[in-house]
Amino acid sequence: MPHTILHSSILITLALVFYSIGIWSERFAKYLKPWHVIAFWAGFLFDTLGTWNMHILATKPFYLFEPHTLTGQIAIWLMCVHAVWATVVIKKGSEKSRIGFHKYSLIVWLVWLIPYFMGMYLGMHK
């Protein structure tokens, strides 16, 4: 396995770990805490770095409407919006918004899993 593919895979898997820890711990707590937001941002950072490395490795031109690319772009933008929103809720949000925030987090995480597993599947079939 080329070094860059291994590096990218590790970064994307770190994104899964950090984002999952943030999502599930927030869901179980039913209350958004500052460290959850740090986990969201860490997941987003690792995902962005891993995605960029994979983009560099791509052998064919960038096609936005390929399923993996499209779902990956949707997921990474949702992660960004989710992390920004969580940051705003922590800084300026009410107690009610901190309590109810977890209802939306799981949806973003589930959308993110689609390109994660699709990429794994595509990588195994090359």
Image (spheres, rainbow, N blue to C red):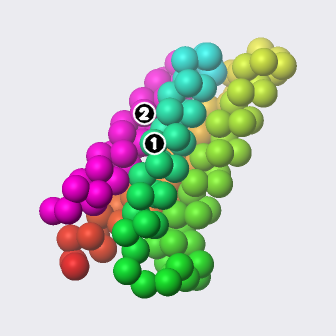
- Tell me the magenta residue range: 1-30
- Disc 2: which residue: 18
**Magenta span has 9?**
yes
Q: Is residue 110 visible?
A: no
Q: Is residue 72 visible?
A: yes
Relative depth, front residue between 82 and 25: 82
The residue that appears at 74% across and 35% down in the rendered structure is: 85
Residue 49's place in the image compared with 122, above or below, is: above
Type of amino acid at the residue the image marks with label 2: Phe
Type of amino acid at the residue the image marks with label 1: Phe
Residue 98 left/right relative to 4? right
Main secondary structure type of the part rendered in magenta: helix
The residue positioned farthest toward the left in the image shown: 1
Residue 107's place in the image compared with 52, above or below, is: above
- Disc 1: which residue: 46
Residue 21 left/right relative to 63? left
Image coords of residue 35 (percent x, y): 55, 17
